[in-house]
Amino acid sequence: MTSLRLASAALAAAFTFSAGSALAAPPPKAKVGVLTDMTGPYSGMGGPGSVVAAKMAIEDCLAAECKGMTIDLVSADHQNKADIGSTTARKWFEQDGVDAIFDLTNSAVSLSVQKLAKEKGKTVFFSGPASTRLTNEDCSPYGFHWMFDTYALAAGPAKAITKRGGKTWYILTVDYAFGHSLEKDASEMVKQSGGTVLGTSRHPLGTTDFSSYILKAQASKAQVVALANGSADAVNSIKQAQEFGLIKGGQELVPLLLFVNDVHGLGLDVTQGLSYIDGYYWDMDAPSRTWAQAFQAKHGGNKPTMVQGGVYSSVLHYLRSVAAAQTTDGAAVAKKVRELPIRDPVMRNASIRPDGRVIHDMYLVKVKKPSESKGAWDYYTISATVPAAEAFQPLDKSTCDLVAKK
């Protein structure tokens, strides 16, 4: 585990007096933790880059609303294991004075930390996990699902591809909570759009040999083969699907979760033409480009993923809420988190619902051909914007007990 302290310039005077007035209240102190996958299959989308993003958010807030505050940053590797994640979170909350936890990058870990944070009255912000359970049956008044979820990832591609003729599907799924949720949401959307799921295969997290799964997908004769996995698993699936001639054989390959760093690693020769949903792209507009350039300079020349962008956005919003509430008390800060507008270079048209789901615009992107790219990291064309109100599960479908039912 690593730890870092950041503080703004010392106050000009320790105490402020005026006739008949009391001493000015000292600015609040805050301690935030980034709990992520540092070395495993999700380390590229989150990992050390999420720590960089959190540090940038702290620095930006200290220069503005958080001026005068002292802010500590700690980070740790949950190793994609729920028990390690919950043990680390418990130690942070009970012994180390951590006020809020960010990122998580794994649905099983995030669900265990959500339960603990709810018991402790601590705020937690999810940018890396995708399970919709976080804002349904396992929701919390202190939990905020920031960037994407399986409904948002599945709804756009499944609906669009099925309606344009891709009626039969085969789904290759990573075998834990995230994959199960993504498979479920994609299957339901395919069926609602008039399609059929012919079969599924489930693989362990971190699999390197996908040959048997690819062969089953080919044998199914499905028009569409969807990947309900992510990051390193998605990269290996795509590589081996190409090697086995799945696309050349006439089947369409649809990754339901892919990141710009995955495309960078695979190259445009392999990924050209792939379409999927993303919540943030570094080249969307001038504010996005400016922030991404600063991130790139601090993170080894890498552009930010939507997970890392979500960490920046959520840490910044949390710290602004602490500054506004003048306390790190979980209930008071959660109230401010819901009240304050979300404004930063990452999120567009964002707001927070009663179930803790942050809704915002999502984007259907298509990977460019090598001839269309102007250089490194120029990889996407934004095909369509999915408005915030349509991108996520409708609120009236939520099973969260915080949502008032008519």
Image (cartoon, rainbow, N blue to C red):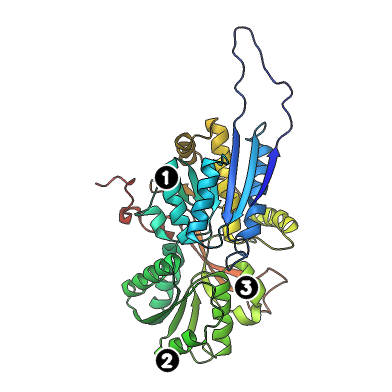
Q: Return the residue found at the far left.
A: 406
Residue at the (32%, 74%) spot, across then down:
191
**Residue 294 located left or right of residue 87:** right
User: Which labelled disc corresponds to residue 118?
Assistant: 1
Which of the 4 image quarters holds residue 284?
Answer: bottom right
The residue where tag 3 is placed is 263
Does the rendering let one see residue 388?
A: no
Q: Secondary structure at mark 3?
A: helix
**Residue 59 located left or right of residue 151:** right
Kindly report the distance in space between the C-alpha atoms of the residues bearing marks 3 and 1: 37 Å
Comparing 137 with 85, the one in front is 85
Residue at the (69%, 40%) spot, across then down:
6
Query: At which x and y percent is residue 22?
Result: 59, 13
Q: Secondary structure at mark 1?
A: helix
Q: Secondary structure at mark 2?
A: helix
The residue where tag 2 is placed is 219
Query: At which x and y percent is residue 378?
Result: 67, 69
Which of the 4 image quarters holds residue 68?
Answer: top right
Count the marks: how many?
Answer: 3
**Residue 3 located left or right of residue 33:** right
Mark before the other along the chain sequence, 3 or 1? 1
